[in-house]
Image (cartoon, rainbow, N blue to C red):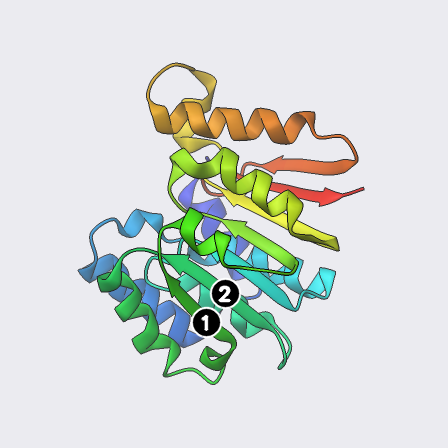
Amino acid sequence: MISPDILAYCISHSTSPSELVKELGDYTVKNISGSNMLIGEMEAAVLGFLIKLGGVKRVLELGTFTGYSALAMAEQLPADGTVTTVDINPHTTKVAREYWDRSPHGQKISQILKPGRDALAGLTGTFDLVFIDADKNGYPFYLEWALAHLSPRGLIVTDNTLWSGKVLTPAQDNQTESIISHNSQARELLGYTKVLLPVRDGMYLITKS
């Protein structure tokens, strides 16, 4: 959405994830198909800022991939903070665990290897931050679940909510329609404060008013 030079300038003036997280990102780009799913340093900086600002302790992440975002968030959590992350891919999550095990913050992360709906059916309690970055067709369902399991000062962050600009042209495919539906649901929420940021591929932030 912005020029690479401006993006690099913003990253250079933001709090960066650890060298281990950066190494994981580099490994993913070089070795894992679909590396464009990485959130990258700019989005990691935004998530870290929100964690610190909100005093977040309990995080739920839907969509682990190679564990970059889970580790970046875990690094910003207090010692008693936790990240529960959900995915279905045993190959990419194996990579994730190998890197988490190398970090002192990896002990904060627990992994659920199940489809999103099945995993959520087994979770209880509330979360201070729900990061939605899983299968796009599930976005409306994930949003409804997150709203029902958000702590009083909690925050929902949904990734890819601009979908490379496809949200401006409806009726293209199921994934685009699902993201548009999610965005419409969020926009119409009463009693919540929302902002859709043009960061990376779109970050939709939702919190109780």
Q: Position of residue 45 (x, y in %)?
A: 55, 59
In the figure, residue 201 lies in which quadrant? top left
Disc 1 residue type (three-letter)? Ser
Q: Which residue is mark 1?
A: 110
Residue 10's tag is none
Q: Is residue 42 visible?
A: no
* Residue contact between numbered discs 1 and 2, judged by CB atoms under 8 Å: yes
Q: Residue at x 63, y 80 (%)?
A: 80
- Per the model, the C-alpha gap separating discs 1 and 2 is 5 Å
Q: Nearer the viewer, residue 174 or 193?
A: 174
Q: Residue at x 39, y 26 (%)?
A: 176
Residue position marked by numbered label 2 in the rendering: 84
What amino acid type is highlighted by mark number 2?
A: Thr
Instruction: Mark 1 or mark 2: name the one nearer the start of the chain.
Output: 2
Residue 67 position, x and y percent, is: 38, 64
Q: Please give left or right for residue 32 compared with residue 196 in the image.
A: left
Asked if residue 99 lies left or right of residue 107, the reply is left
- Residue 111: quarter of image: bottom left
Q: Residue at x 22, y 63 (%)?
A: 91
